[in-house]
Amino acid sequence: MEEIKLKAQKRESATKGELNQARKAGRVPGIYYAKGGDPVHFYTSEITLKPLVFTSETHIIMLEVEGMEAKRAIIKDVQFDPVSDRVVHFDLQGVTVGEKLTVQVPILFTGRAEGLKQGGIFQSPIHKLDVECLPKDIPQHLEIDITHLSLNDSIFVKDLNFPDLKILNNEDVLVATVQLPRGVAEETTEDLLSNEPQQPELIKKGKSGEDEE
């Protein structure tokens, strides 16, 4: 697991106005917390933070706050501005050697699904999984091979197994599937229904003229 340094300046409690001014100046407020320790409030450069937030990999962060001992951490939560999508605040969780932690890890799909050759499309409703593991076992991403997926095949959490990791998501959560496009699937169903053998119409036999006489 790659460690990336993040330099920061310690900050005291600030008013909402002061925080907004800091953000306009390109500084993002953050907080570091760890079990058994006091939280540390700080500012860091937005430019420095972006590669750690907008990424498809998980990293161990070495937080270097002026005047304090460096601390190892992972990004636990990020808050974005609903209009500009800029980071307005983030939380770092301290990492302790030998102590398990919970972290979200991005999924990386590899291979080309067989079902694509049959007219299907690949769908993935989730892009990260919650895992529990030791700091040394945190992967940058979870690699999942989809080569074997044929049309109408799916991968669920219960189908996954990674060494030294415990997946915390419900085992019935859908991870990936290959399905026909919706319009094609509907047309196929209609064709099947229209091709069903029709039952012969029963004609009720009435009395003949001779019978009436």
Image (cartoon, grey):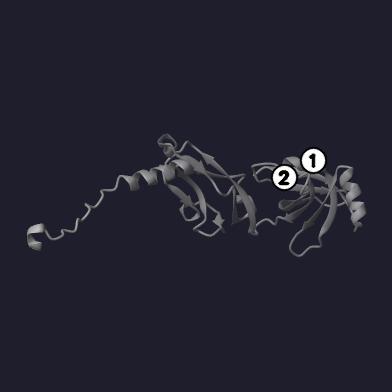
Q: Amino acid at mark 2?
A: Val
- Please tell me the numbered disc located at residue 53: 2
Q: Is residue 75 left or right of residue 41?
A: left
Q: Nearer the viewer, residue 205 or 145?
A: 205
Q: Disc 1 marks which residue?
A: 48
Disc 1 + disc 2, Cβ < 8 Å = no
Residue drawn at x 42%, y 41% as measured from the top left: 148
Residue closest to the far front: 213
Q: Is residue 167 left or right of residue 32?
A: left
Residue drawn at x 62%, y 55% as measured from the top left: 134
The x, y position of residue 75, in whole percent, is 72, 51
The mark lying in front, picked from 1 and 2, is: 2
Compare marks 1 and 2 and give the one earlier in the sequence: 1
Q: Is residue 193 left or right of residue 66?
A: left
**Does dot 1 land on a helix, a strand or a loop?**
helix
The x, y position of residue 147, in whole percent, is 44, 39
**Does dot 2 land on a helix, a strand or a loop?**
helix
Distance, label 1 to label 2, CA atoms, is 10 Å
- Please tell me the numbered disc located at residue 154: none
Q: Amino acid at mark 1?
A: Thr
Q: Nearer the viewer, residue 178 or 22?
A: 178
Q: Is residue 47 left or right of residue 132?
A: right
Residue closest to the far top: 117
The x, y position of residue 24, in whole percent, is 88, 44
The x, y position of residue 74, in whole percent, is 71, 51
Quadrant of the image containing the C terminus: bottom left
